[in-house]
Image (spheres, rainbow, N blue to C red):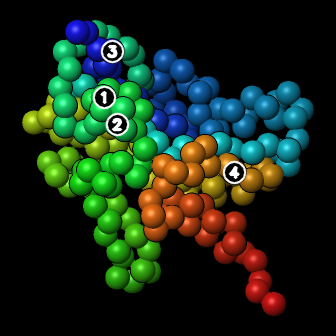
């Protein structure tokens, strides 16, 4: 059986295309904002969608570029809820499978996630998104985490957007790590009476 995989995996939901290496440079948070506002759509009526999922790719790539589907053999390490080692996967599943481990910052108490179980967590500065890489499993997982979602929420707030929406709440952890990162941005400038 042949599966679809990306030999050149791309970011899950890019903030922007800072390195100008994407085949879809406008398919980003900043690109969408600029497109809508250039058409005289008011920022105050825009809501930025944020994912709680990522994508598994069969790949030995060391970085991200663009998602391009090509036939490949099936290799399993990370699997999604359907039992596939290709396709979409929830953030929650990455934590449950042990390829992401929670790590509390001793100074702030905020949780960040590090690679585990043979996966290294990398950061793509071109799109401001994380990805996991396992050379032994031949997999790259592009996803969003509290850090990348916080950055996108800050962008939405700075640019005057109405707000953000998380696509799939069940994709978050039991501790609501993704939701809390986003909520902190919008609640941090409010005064409690």
Residue 33, percent from left and from top: 72, 37
Q: Report if the CB atoms under discs 2 and 3 are less than 8 Å apart.
A: no
N-terminal of the pair, mark 2 or mark 3, is 3
CB contact under 8 Å: marks 3 and 1: no
Task: Tell which of 30 and 183 is nearer to you.
Answer: 183
Nearer the N terminus, badge 3 or badge 4? 3
Direction from residue 114 to residue 158 in the image, left or right:
right
**Badge 1 density bin: few <14, some 14–19, many ≥20, Cα 10 Å:** some
Relative height, residue 52 to residue 181 (above, below) = above
Q: Which mark is residue 164?
A: 4
Q: Residue shown at 78%/50% (left/top)?
A: 161
Which residue lies at the image location 37% right of the left edge and 14% below the top edge?
Answer: 69
Instruction: Give the labeled residue for mark 3.
Output: 4
Packing grade of label 3 (10 A; few <14, some 14-19, many >=20) is: some
Q: How far apart are the two marked residues, 1 and 2, measured between alpha carbons?
A: 5 Å
Q: Which residue is mark 1?
A: 84
Badge nearest the viewer, 3 or 4: 3
Residue 28 place in picture, x, y as percent: 59, 33
Q: Residue 64: give x, y in percent of width and height.
A: 35, 32
Q: Which residue is mark 2?
A: 80
Mark toward the start of the polypeptide (3 vs 1): 3
SS at badge 2: loop
Q: Residue 11 at what x, y percent from top left? A: 43, 34
| Any part of residue 62 in sight | no
């Amino acid at each position: 059986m042949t599966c679809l995989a990306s030999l050149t995996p791309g970011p899950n939901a890019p903030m922007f295309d800072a390195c100008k290496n994407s085949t879809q440079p406008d398919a980003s948070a900043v690109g969408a904002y600029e497109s809508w506002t250039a058409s005289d759509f008011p920022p105050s009526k825009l809501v930025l969608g944020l994912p709680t999922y990522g994508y598994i790719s069969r790949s030995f790539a060391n970085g991200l570029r663009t998602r391009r589907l090509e036939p490949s053999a099936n290799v399993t390490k990370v699997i999604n809820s359907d039992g596939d080692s290709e396709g979409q996967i929830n953030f929650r599943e990455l934590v449950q499978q042990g390829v992401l481990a929670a790590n509390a910052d001793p100074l702030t108490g905020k949780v960040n996630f590090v690679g585990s179980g043979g996966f290294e967590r990398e950061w793509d500065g071109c799109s401001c998104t994380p990805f996991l890489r396992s050379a032994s499993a031949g997999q790259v997982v592009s996803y969003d985490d509290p850090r990348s979602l916080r950055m996108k929420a800050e962008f939405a707030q700075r640019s005057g957007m109405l707000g953000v929406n998380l696509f799939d709440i069940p994709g978050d952890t039991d501790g609501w790590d993704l939701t809390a990162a986003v909520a902190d941005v919008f609640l941090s400038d409010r005064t409690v009476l």
